[in-house]
Amino acid sequence: MITKPVAGEFASFYASYIAAVSEAGPVAALEAQRAAIAALGALPEGKATLRYADGKWSVKEVLGHVSDAERVFGYRLLRMARADATPLAGFDENLWAANAPHHTRPISDVVNELLAVREATLALIRSLNAAALERTVVANDTPVSARALCWILAGHAQHHLHILSERYGVVTPLGPLTTKSWEPGVLGG
């Protein structure tokens, strides 16, 4: 079990992501989210290109963003796991989204890519030992621990799945994630 990080191990704007993860921890959350993500692969293309407001990302772009961010967080985590304390740059998610092909790809491709990234993320997290989890690095000008990144990864995805439910109407909210099985809900038509 990866214990919950404390203030000082992450930038304060990540606190809501960490709070979104149940006490079962980030591995259980990341595993449970796979079913909701996979269910989105069956979303009709018309629904997958939906934007809830002008200037907002489509469903595909939200999922592409989750995939991109998970890769960045995973890379940061890998650097810490290998005891590389080189400061790491941030990234501009809006610039990335504007230049990514997510919106023009089939939803099944976007979902399958995210699921592949998720499997790699889980394999990396499961490989971490206690020493690796305690390491920190400066990322985007702020210190962050490996342990905190595990929780941030899970909370970031949870946050966006919640937005997909609340603002786009395409998934049922997952609620607190536990190790129990659950149903991903009904996709919007």
Image (tube, helix red, strand yellow):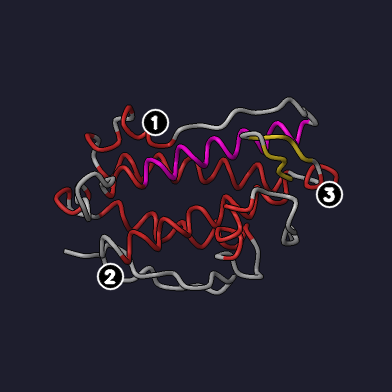
Measured from the top left, where is residue 62 in percent x and y? 35, 47
Q: Residues within 10 Å of mark 2 (few under 14, many from 20)?
A: few
Relative height, residue 112 to residue 151 (above, below): above
Q: Residues within 10 Å of mark 3 (few under 14, many from 20)?
A: few
What secondary structure is the magenta-colored segment mainly? helix
Q: Amino acid at mark 3?
A: Ala
Image quadrant occupied by the N terminus:
bottom right
Q: Nearer the viewer, mark 1 or mark 2?
A: 1
Q: Are marks 1 and 2 in contact (CB under 8 Å)?
A: no
Measured from the top left, where is residue 137 in percent x and y? 74, 36
CA gap between label 1 and label 2 equals 30 Å
- The circle on residue 130 is 3
Determine if the magenta segment contains residue 180: no
Residue 184, picture quadrant: bottom left
Measured from the top left, where is residue 100 in percent x and y? 33, 30
- The circle on residue 186 is 2
Residue at image coords 38%, 43%? 112
Residue at image coords 40%, 63%? 162
Residue behind mark 1? 96
Looking at the rendering, the stretch of residues picked out in magenta corresponds to: 63-82
Q: Secondary structure at mark 3?
A: helix
